[in-house]
Amino acid sequence: MRRAVCPGSFDPIHNGHLEVIARAAGLFDEVIVAVSTNYAKKYRFSLEDRMEMARETLASLRGIIVEPMGEGLLAEYCRNRGVSAIVKGLRSSSDFDYELPMATMNRQLTGVETVFLPAEAHYVHLSSTLIKEISVLGGDISDFVPKSVLKRLLAGEPPTEPPRKG
């Protein structure tokens, strides 16, 4: 079985993420959407909410698993889960410059390859940060996020902080 992982914080998941995940599902037998937590970040949604939004949104796609990535290195996560490829969407050359050293390190650590998928032109401007900012300021984000995300953003749920380590 060819298994890939699409890692990210998905705070929140948006249509650019969905497009990359759907394309990955066409290339691999199974795609794990590994929802990560960076303890240095302040999140809009809890890990549980981010996973629930991803599950609701991706339910119609075959071969998709949504799970928390947990702590530790992505390369080790991939080794432990039998993942042969990490799939990353690229919006611009700056994304490539950021992702390439990590891809090389992941390959050197555990042999896992990274597959870069260029974003569709109508999604290159999307980022979770920008979507949250536009939403807070009252802008219309309905074309950029799935319905489950839109509903939560419009509900105005307060930001959550990840649990502290240690």
Image: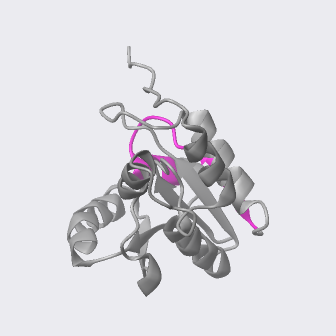
Residue 66 can be seen in this image: no
- What colouring does the structure picture have? one colour
Q: Is residue 75 magenta?
A: yes
Residue that lies at the very extreme toward the front in this rendered image:
138
Segment colored magenta: 63-78
- Residue visible at 61% across and 38% down in the picture: 49
Nearer-the-camera pick, 113 or 46? 46
Nearer-the-camera pick, 102 or 41? 41
Name the image quarter holding residue 93: bottom left
Residue 101 can be seen in this image: yes
User: Which quarter shows the N terminus?
Assistant: bottom right
User: Which quarter shows the C terminus?
Assistant: top left
**Residue 74 position in % (x across, y down):** 42, 50
Name the image quarter holding residue 124: bottom left
**Residue 137 position in % (x across, y down):** 39, 49
Residue that lies at the very extreme toward the top in this rendered image:
166
How many marks can you see? 0
In this rendering, is residue 153 above or below 97?
A: above
- Residue visible at 39% across and 18% down in the picture: 164
Residue that lies at the very extreme toward the bottom in this rendered image:
121
- Residue visible at 37% across and 37% down in the picture: 38
In this rendering, is residue 112 above or below 166?
A: below
- Residue visible at 42% across and 36% down in the picture: 43
